[in-house]
Image (cartoon, rainbow, N blue to C red):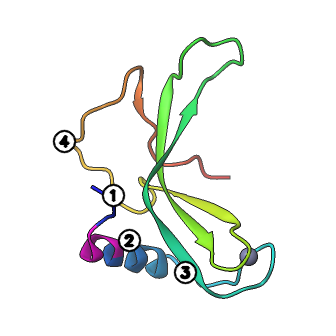
Amino acid sequence: MDAWPEEFRADIVKRLQERGMNRPCGRCGHEKFTLVDGYAVFALAMILEAEHAERLLPSVCIACARCGYLTFHALAALGMLSENQPLPPGDGAAGEPPQL
Ligand SMILES: [Zn+2]
């Protein structure tokens, strides 16, 4: 698959807009962005000496159309992790990010 289907991309954009993602780029102030096809998956370890990732944090990536500044949004926060999704090795996918 070279690119996500347009309907799927539109759903992600809708989810981001519903959560108030409507501010200009944090680096250059531009107001146009591109949804990057493909998940960005962060490997998490509880200690730096860990040999393997203990948890995976899947996200979608948004790129500023002018400067390329990248921002990431966790799938869990977007309501995109299903209960039946296969778990990655280790503890499983990271759930909701902690509230600060
Ligand atoms: Zn920018």
**Amino acid under disc 2:** Ile
Q: Residues within 10 Å of mark 2 (few under 14, many from 20)?
A: some
Q: Residues within 10 Å of mark 3 (few under 14, many from 20)?
A: few
Residue range (magenta)? 5-9
- In this view, 38 is above or below 95: below
Q: Residue at 38% of width from left, 71% of height from top?
A: 12
Which mark sits nearer the N-terminus, 2 or 3? 2
Q: Which residue carries the number 1 mark?
A: 80
Query: Upstream in the sequence, badge 4 or badge 3?
Result: 3
Instruction: Look at mark 3 in the image and give the residue it sits on.
Output: 20
The answer to whether residue 2 of the structure is visible from this angle is yes
Q: Residue at 70% across / 79% down in the picture?
A: 66
Q: Specify the label residue 70 is tagged with.
A: none
7 to 87, vertically: above or below: below
Is 16 in the magenta? no
User: Is there CB contact under 8 Å for labels 1 and 2?
Assistant: yes
Spatial CA span between label 1 and label 2: 9 Å
Q: CA distance from mark 2 to mark 3?
A: 13 Å
Gap in angstroms between the C-alphas marked 4 and 3: 28 Å
Labels 2 & 3 near each other (Cβ < 8 A): no
The CA distance from mark 4 to mark 2 is 19 Å
* Of the pair 34 and 95, the residue shown nearer to us: 34
Question: What numbered label is drawn on residue 12?
Answer: 2
**Along the horizontal axis of the image, is 71 left or right of 29?**
left
Give the amino acid type for the residue marked by disc 3 in the picture. Gly
* Mark closer to the chain start, 4 or 2: 2
